[in-house]
Image: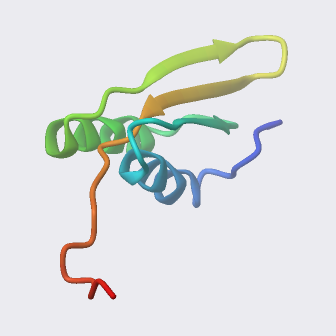
Amino acid sequence: YGGALDTATAPLVLLFACLCDEAHVSRVRVGRLTPYTVQYVRHLRDFFGVTFKIRTDDATRTTLFTCAGASLRNTAKAVK
């Protein structure tokens, strides 16, 4: 379908984009959107408060997701 990700790995990469630092903007190009991916993005918005800007490209039949992450940190990590 022309995307950088297939439909099976798209939710995992969208989760990583959601968890990254707020100062960095993540861009993910996905091929075909499935109902599962759409609902998963809604869950990410509800749980992390991160909104995705979604643009479709009809020429390549892909969808581009853009977001600034939630800046979550691992508080259990030992600081040396």
**Which is nearer the eye, 7 or 78?**
78
Q: Is residue 19 left or right of residue 24?
A: left
Q: How is the image coloured?
A: rainbow
Quadrant location of residue 75? Answer: bottom left
Question: Where is the C terminus found, in terms of image quarters?
Answer: bottom left
The furthest residue to the front? 80
Q: Is residue 18 left or right of residue 17?
A: left
Q: Is residue 59 left or right of residue 77?
A: right
Residue 61: x %, y % from top left? 76, 22
- 40 in relation to 33, above or below: below
- 2 in relation to 72, above or below: above
Q: Is residue 23 left or right of residue 49?
A: right
Question: Where is the N terminus found, in terms of image quarters?
Answer: top right
Q: How many marks?
A: 0
Quadrant location of residue 41? Answer: top left
Residue 58: x %, y % from top left? 75, 11
Seen at 58% across and 60% down, the residue is 9
Residue 16: x %, y % from top left? 46, 56
Residue 44: x %, y % from top left? 27, 43
The furthest residue to the top? 58
Seen at 26% across and 88% down, the residue is 78
**Which is nearer the eye, 8 or 45?**
45
- 74 in relation to 72, above or below: below
Seen at 54% across and 29% down, the residue is 65
Seen at 56% across and 51% down, the residue is 10
Quadrant location of residue 56? Answer: top right
